[in-house]
Amino acid sequence: MKGLIAIVICLLFSGCQRNTAQWENVKTAGRYVQKGINSLCGKNTDSYLLTCDDDFVGPEQDEYIPLQDSDLKTQFASTDRAIPQQKLTPAILPRKANFIKPSSKLADTFRTIHFDTDDHVVREKYDLISVARIANYLKKHANAFLLIEGHCDQRASADYNMALGARRANHIRVLIVKQKVDPSRIITVSCGKEKLVSFGSTPQDWSMNRRAEFKIFEK
Amino acid sequence: MNFFRIILLFPLILFSTEEISVALKTKSGLETVRIIEIENNEVFYNSRHFKELKKVLEFDFSNNGYTHLTDEKFSNYDIKILSEKNKFLCSLKDKKLNKSYRFEPIYLSGSIDVDRKKIHKLSDSILKKVFGVQGIATTTILYSVRKKSSKSPNDWSSEIWVSDYDGQNARQITFGEHYNVCPTFIPLKNIEGYQNFLYVSYRKGQPKIFRASFNSPIGKQLFTLPGNQLLPSVSHDCKMVAFVCDADGRPDLFLQKYTPLGEPIGKPTQLFSSPRATQATSSFSPDGSKLAFLSDKDGSPRIYVIDIPYQGAVQRPKATLISKHNRQNSSPSWSYDGKKIAYSALTNGVKQVWIYNLETDEEKQLTFSSENKENPRWAPNSLHLIYNTEDGIYSELYIINLNHPNPVQITFGTGQKRFPSWEPKLKKRG
């Protein structure tokens, strides 16, 4: 019986490797299954009780009317919780032109982070260590502001990449804010596929373009 | 047998006083038009000017979606053009009905840019007279042109341009070597036509949506929402603007409603968001009751349709998937007749333009050539589309029509031309 299961798993994975479409089917099916399980567990309730401030950093209510769907606040909490952008007055917010590439001394701290295709989550351990280093730097330098640029490779369309770039930059912002850094010191900019660093059409070129870059400003 | 017929009919042909014309239906189903230039030495402007204007007329009748040009004698329609002093005279013979029409003379200015517009107007008048349909020859196109910045060799600038629908008469609207993208016409007509538009500019650092006009291209920032504001779309009655914004920490779909006078009604509403999803380009149905948009909420980016809630949404509206055939989709555009949604989809490794038919729930591939195609946008006649190709180095604009899906390149030269937007519906012209 165990052998049969192993063969089925092997066949499934080998099929996915050969055929991207099948893998997409598996992913899509997986999401629907998860939704179903959540539904059975009663996790699709319309509202829920906030237990602490950290549970949900609410939007600035004077700016827009937010959706109240509970899954926007609870589901996938560890990696995909969103932290609303802060409205910053021009006096506080440095102009983008004032942000500069970190000096060579800080290059290791503010290392470019790379993403998987069509993904916005930082998965590699050394990338997560980089994020932790950036958070530590910001905690130590109270006058420092961080600008995160989210970039994409050239394969998907320009419009989708603009949104995906924002998603990537925001994900890193969330990871840094979770380490007790004031969110108002972090600005995100989506560059989509507008600023490529590698113009070739190999997987290496695409990988280099799927990135988040950092710039800093110190008062 | 045929030989005897020819022998019998030969005397008739020889002595016939009138031409025998046989209208032949072409394979494509388009009507055939022959443009005949009548020689006249009594002209104010040089013959080159007249030839240029003839080319304009030829382009219009090759690409209007109802006719195509022929040099054959047996055309369905003959258009005769004549230059007399500073006038451009035009008449049309409908050979099927054996009717002739004479059109108002066009007084030429001598400026090719001005006179081109007059010829486009004539083309639309002829189309209206013969086929009873609204032409698109007088419409314009907004788009962005991306170039290497002169300030820094590693930087790019992108500015907004406008041109006639055939790519001619192009002029730059925004200046300053900023990064401006995603222009979209506001369907609000003033005395000078449709001159208002929205666009996304990076000039403040983060991308923000600006409302501008041809005379005042810098414009004003439309929303005070924090974060990145991207990909605006305007409803046909100008009472709603949908856009993507990460104010809530994700790129979500937002909606702002307006009064008929253009005053915002309340605050922007977060219209659609999903925990792991990225939302992108949206497009309103003509009646403003629905919105098509791009989301990767179920895996890869696909096109969904939602009902726009009458009042602010508290719960996420139910999204209906429409692009089931392909996975990597983008840039939905709802046609003015409400029956079709055009979008770009990765098909056998190449991004092609597809059409989703809302009446039959069917998807159909429109383009097949080897270049990647993005940002299809409908013309007001719901027959033509414009899109840009994209290969990382070159991007040009093409127009195509559903009756004769043969793409025609309308832009040339330096810069990457992208994000086209076709001037909205024109009711009173023609």
Image (cartoon, rainbow, N blue to C red):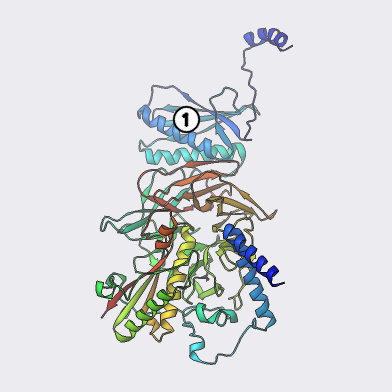
Query: Percent from the top left, x then y, of residue B118?
Result: 44, 39
Instruction: Give the vertical position of B371 relative to B212 (above or below).
Output: above
The chain to which mark 1 is attached is B
Instruction: Give the vertical position of B19 relative to B168 (above or below).
Output: above
B134 or A178: which is nearer to us? A178
The residue type indicated by label 1 comes to Leu
Local secondary structure at mark 1: strand
Name, please, the residue furthest toward the bottom: A51
B360 or A75: which is nearer to us? A75
The residue under label 1 is: B89
Q: Quadrant of residue B1?
A: top right
Name, please, the residue furthest toward the right: B1
Residue drawn at x 53%, y 75% is B269
Q: Residues within 10 Å of mark 1 (few under 14, many from 20)?
A: some
Residue drawn at x 49%, y 84% is A58
Instruction: Give the vertical position of A108 relative to B281 (above or below).
Output: below
Residue drawn at x 48%, y 45% is B398
Report if residue B115 is visible in the image.
yes
Query: Percent from the top left, x then y, of residue A174?
Result: 44, 79
A139 or B367: which is nearer to us? A139
Report if residue B430 is visible in the image.
no
Query: Percent from the top left, x then y, of residue B207?
Result: 40, 67
Residue B59 shown left or right of residue B217 in the figure: right
Numbered disc total: 1
Query: Percent from the top left, x then y, of residue B287?
Result: 61, 61
Residue B385 shown left or right of residue A215 in the figure: right
